[in-house]
Amino acid sequence: MSETWDVAVIGAGPAGLAAATLLAEQQARVVLLDEQAEPGGQIYRGIERARNHAALLSALGDDYRRGTDVVTRFRASAAAYRPGSLVWQVTPQREVWFSNGGRSHVIEAKVVVLATGAMERPVPLPGWTLPGVMTAGALQIMLKSSGVVPDEPFVIAGSGPLLYLLVQQCLAVGARPEAVLETASRGDAWRALPHLPAAMRSRDLAKGLAMIAALRRSGVPRFRRVSDIQIEGTDAVSGIRFRGGGREHHLATRLVALHEGVIPAQQMARSIGCAFAWDATQRCFAPVVDEWGNSSINDVMIAGDAAGIGGARVAEHAGRIVALEALRRTGRIDAVQRDTLASADWQARRTHLAIRRFLDVRYAPRAEILHPADDVLVCRCEEVSASALREVVRQGCLGPNQAKAFLRAGMGPCQGRLCGPVVSEVIAEARKVNPGEVGYYRVRPPLKPIAVGELIAPET
């Protein structure tokens, strides 16, 4: 017999930690499953170890240090915690299958909360598959996990708040970028202006402006309104070429960190059958959820950035709001109690979200990465180019699932995580329709590669 819980929470980032903590404090039987070896998710990665390294903790900033309180409160709760648990299937009947220690296990829950967070948007540019190219998030993970920073020339390129935060963190630990290439356009700045008054209600706007001012003071070369980025090299990165200020530029570098915003992680929710809708502003799919985090599948809930990008503080409040709804669904509180207990988190969530529309428009993804040049690889695993995708559309391919049959796109080790958003965009562009009409891959378990033996003989 499998274990049965009131609530199973998947993901130990801000949303998952907040949800599991509140559920445990309200006496619910809750288990938190997470793939990593320690709590914190990507945002608060390594926070417990960082507490013993004052210089690193200071360099990573106040927002990162907040993770100490979040994790400490979770550790003090009675929530069951199973780190190192790779969830590879969740069924609509709320069975959660996961791998831990080389063996697969299954548990059941009355309610399942998906707090699987976000992923960085793919940035398909010429040369993006070269060794020496990584995402800005990957560079930040190295810094948070072990204090490692590049010891060779590096360039940070893209747009969005994380870009400025990463530069600030690198400078604080003595790692100076060769340059920062900002790809946000002047047109997006004008389009974002109507949303500025609402953004001014958020303290995050002042933080962002302070980071930009710090970048100016640092003297790091800053190129604005950059386009036509090409990463050069044969066996590894050797340089980067781009257009900025009306002329061509070239920089020698050994490492390039790319970032063009984040989008909800959708694989797990899609595999269960949750409904998704197309977000035309941020050019991504997001799950259809109500104000309490309920998905289209009964008793499957989605919290934090997995439900829509809002940031760490929004995710924390959303985690508690979802937890209160889960308590109502399991019969521990009624709707009136839920509403009363959630009022403070609702207010705080609204305050932190005040800046969101401004950011979404100001740092909207650009056509250059949504519709890459023909010779750019779109599916890295199966080495499928944008031109190959466009050709099969001319042959009658209507969407990503047919592209699998034509080209094996999305059938590699990443199972479409990296190529899925771009494949939908390229097919939609070729068909001259909305990506929402084209759709996304049909996601099937196992969600991550596991040994065949774990499928044959799972432990219950």
Image (spheres, rainbow, N blue to C red):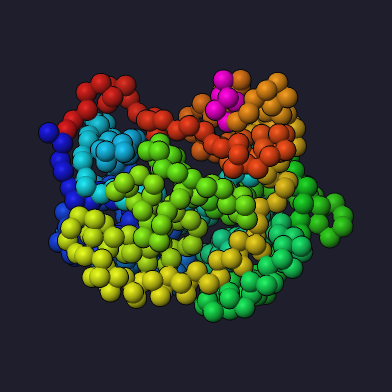
The residue at the point 20 percent across, 55 percent down is 330
| Image x and y of residue 237, in percent | 67, 41
Which quarter of the rendered picture does the N terminus lie within?
top left
| Image x and y of residue 269, in percent | 41, 43
The residue at the point 76 percent across, 62 percent down is 187
Which quarter of the rendered picture does the C terminus lie within?
top left
Q: Is residue 126 left or right of residue 90?
A: right
Residue placed most toward the observer, 124 or 393: 393
Looking at the image, which residue sits at the far right? Answer: 247
| Image x and y of residue 398, in percent | 63, 28
Q: Main secondary structure of the magenta part?
A: helix
Q: Is residue 171 left or right of residue 97?
A: right
Check if residue 403 falls in the magenta segment: yes
Residue placed most toward the observer, 336 or 370: 336
The residue at the point 50 percent across, 49 percent down is 286
Quadrant housing residue 344: bottom left
Looking at the image, which residue sits at the far left? Answer: 1
Question: Count the marks: how many?
Answer: 0
Residue placed most toward the observer, 301 or 457: 301
Q: Can see residue 458?
A: yes
Query: What residue span does the magenta drawing correspond to?
Result: 400-405
Q: Is residue 98 left or right of residue 442?
A: left
Quadrant housing residue 431: top right
The residue at the point 22 percent across, 59 percent down is 327
| Image x and y of residue 258, in percent | 62, 50
Is 389 placed above or below 262 here?
above
Check if residue 318 falls in the magenta segment: no
Q: Can see residue 150?
A: no
Residue placed most toward the observer, 388 or 179: 388
